[in-house]
């Protein structure tokens, strides 16, 4: 029984570390349709409008394809004063943006959920989804 609880606590600690490893801060921009073909899935529509393109910072040779992230706006990344909305959004990485400076390039619709798209680029907090908390 005791060892059972200890194992459970250790598993919990490992889960926490994994969560920390997959949470990060960065920036997001947006892009408009057509969203197909994508670098990950060609002409297959796997996640509708709830998508993102990864920049070099996160692309990892395509290993990030299909990964879902919960993304939230944390502040302006340019002169737009208060671009953030309060909600977060879950997106699936389906594309690659080698020339992007932003960490994630969101679909226009996904970006519009977390921030005023007039801002163009915002600071974000993002973490691997599903979250276990
Ligand atoms: C990503 O966003 C930039 C604008 O910041 C845009 O020029 C580029 O074409 C977009 N494309 C993709 C696939 O990410
Ligand atoms: C991303 O990587 C590609 C391939 O290595 C390179 O051509 C491109 O310039 C890089 N983009 C940025 C913004 O650094």
Image (tube, grey):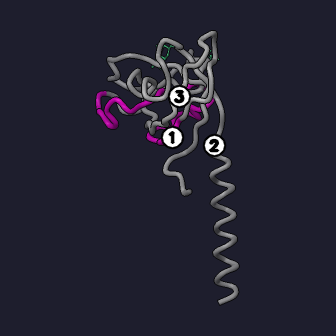
Q: CA distance from mark 1 to mark 3?
A: 11 Å
Identify the element where label 3 is drawn. Answer: strand
Identify the element where label 2 is drawn. Answer: strand
- Count neighbours of disc 3 (C-alpha within 10 A) and say few if under 14, some if 14 to 19, many if 20 or more: many
User: Mark 1 or mark 3: which comes first in sequence?
Assistant: 3
Q: Nearer the viewer, mark 1 or mark 3?
A: 1
Q: Nearer the viewer, mark 3 or mark 2?
A: 2
Q: Residue at x 61, y 14 (%)?
A: 81
Q: Residue at x 54, y 57 (%)?
A: 132
Q: Estimate the x, y position of residue 79 in percent, counting from the top left.
A: 63, 9
Q: Residue at x 68, y 72 (%)?
A: 9
Displayed quadrant of residue 121: top right
Q: CA distance from mark 3 to mark 2?
A: 15 Å
Name the side, left or right, on which 6 lies relative to 108: right
Q: CA distance from mark 2 to mark 1?
A: 9 Å
- Identify residue for label 2: 23
**Label drawn at residue 54:** 3
User: Residue lying farthest top?
Assistant: 79
90 in relation to 27, above or below: below
User: Residue lying farthest left?
Assistant: 44
Q: Estimate the x, y position of residue 4 in percent, counting from the top left.
A: 64, 83
- Identify residue for label 1: 69
Give the extent of the magenta segment.
Answer: 43-71
Identify the element where label 1 is drawn. Answer: strand
Q: Residue at x 44, y 36 (%)?
A: 91
Residue 69 on the magenta span? yes
């Amino acid at each position: 029984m005791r060892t059972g609880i200890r194992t459970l606590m250790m598993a919990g600690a490992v889960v926490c570390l994994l969560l920390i490893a997959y949470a990060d801060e960065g920036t997001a921009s947006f892009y408009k349709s057509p969203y197909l073909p994508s670098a990950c899935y060609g002409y297959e529509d796997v996640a509708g409008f709830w998508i993102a393109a990864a920049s070099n910072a996160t692309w990892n040779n395509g290993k990030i394809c299909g990964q879902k992230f919960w993304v939230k706006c944390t502040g302006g990344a340019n002169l737009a004063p208060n671009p953030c909305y309060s909600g977060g959004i879950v997106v699936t990485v389906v594309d690659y943006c080698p020339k992007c400076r932003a960490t994630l390039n969101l679909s226009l619709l996904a970006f519009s959920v977390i921030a005023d798209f007039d801002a163009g680029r915002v600071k974000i907090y993002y973490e691997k989804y599903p979250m276990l908390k």
